[in-house]
Amino acid sequence: MTQQRIYLSSPHMSGLEQQFVQEAFDTNWIAPLGPHVDAFEHEFAQRVGIKHAAALSSGTAALHLALILAGVGTGDEVLVSTLTFSASVNPIAYLGGRPVFIDSERTSWNMDPALLAETMERKARQGKLPKAVIPVHLYGQSADMTPILEICSRYEIPVIEDAAEALGATYKGRAPGTLGKAGIFSFNGNKIITTSGGGMLVSDDGDFIIQARKLATQSRDPAPHYQHSEIGYNYRLSNVLAGIGRGQLQVLEERVQARRRNFEFYQDTLGDLPGIAFMPEAPWGRHTRWLTVITVDPSQFGADRETIRLALEAENIEARPVWKPMHLQPVFHECEAVGGSVAEDLFEQGLCLPSGSNLSEGDLARVVGVVRSLRR
């Protein structure tokens, strides 16, 4: 008999969500927008320590709107982390822009500030500065934002933080996603909290968020009839899903602690194996361990990352390789890349282990048993 599947990161409901969803039904606020959306925006902004937030249909939608408001258009360059999911880059292409991919550094696996500085200096000399910079906070850990912000401030380039994977993390005591011009978060089903599908755009600039809300509601002008002076989008979050988000937000810290305990279990039970290493926790903040990620040196361990992944899958356990760098993706093969060897190495050796906050110790032990059985 096949054992129950262990997922990489499945939704984890607290029970509080149903109360808010029931309230939406009881009051018939089923249509988009409504009091849960307003409350979710307010509560989320308070939680991360920022002035304004707009609840949207996805993190991708949030990034798309942020790039529109940053003025990105046809032919404009945007500097972005190469080690990320394609949703960090696709909105650049929506607008006819061109991504320039920046390699990772090994302390946090995020955008390398030294490479960013070199690239910015070169672009300035060429007279083609980018319209925006998008550092991605990977797997629950902040990029090193102080030098990134200093570089971008020097050239007056807006920083749009992709914090889709990093809710609950810290950078020098602050929440990643709140340090630049704008930040985006995701509430996709596999994230540390979920609204089923949804996202948030945040900024300390109130006008920025007001403009984003207008764009997200089909850019309807303030008139009794339907009037539009610019192209808009249907990007707002529904009142029902915002109710789920309000319930999830209340247990965010519990979810962070559960995922950090998962990491500690893996570290305690796999850390002694030759060739196995873990994504480091950078000294500048707290890693949520949204996903626990290992790297595998096959010459020391005796099997490579893919052999481990397939062995786990054979036991009905989901694991995934680290993101394939964007500069290696066929759809972006013509785009400029700065460096790339660090991201390529992490992709080649990196494996994300099951990390859900609802995993039992027995589930974690199953994962560990498979990995240890491959050691030769």
Image (cartoon, grey):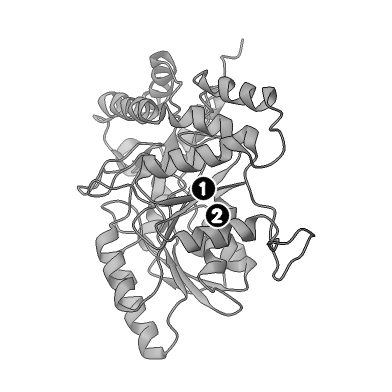
Does the rendering let one see residue 329?
A: no
Which is more N-terminal, label 2 or label 1? Answer: 2
User: Residue 314: percent from the left, percent from the top?
Assistant: 56, 25
284 vs 354, nearest the viewer? 284
Side of 264 relative to 38 (left or right): left
Residue at image location 29% in from the left, 23% down from the top: 269
Amino acid at pointer 2: Ala
Give the residue furthest to the right: 225
Is the residue marked by circle 1 packed among few (<14), some (14-19), or many (20+) residues within 10 Å? many
Residue at image location 30% in from the left, 40% down from the top: 287
Give the residue furthest to the front: 224
- The N terminus - image quarter: top right
The quarter holding residue 276 reads top left
Side of 362 relative to 117 (left or right): right
Disc 1 versus disc 2: distance between alpha carbons? 6 Å
Tell me, for residue 200, which label it has, or none: 1
Side of 170 relative to 75 (left or right): left
Residue at image location 36% in from the left, 53% down from the top: 178
Give the residue furthest to the left: 283
User: Residue 66: percent from the left, percent from the top?
Assistant: 52, 62
SS for dot 1: strand
Does the rendering let one see residue 310?
A: yes
Q: Are marks 1 and 2 in contact (CB under 8 Å)?
A: yes
Side of 178 relative to 235 (left or right): left
**Residue named by callout 2:** 62
User: Residue 3: percent from the left, percent from the top?
Assistant: 56, 14
SS for dot 2: helix
Tell me, for residue 158, which label it has, or none: none
User: Residue 296: percent from the left, percent from the top?
Assistant: 36, 41
335 vs 271, nearest the viewer? 335
Give the residue furthest to the top: 1
Give the answer, above or below, for where 229 lies relative to 329: below
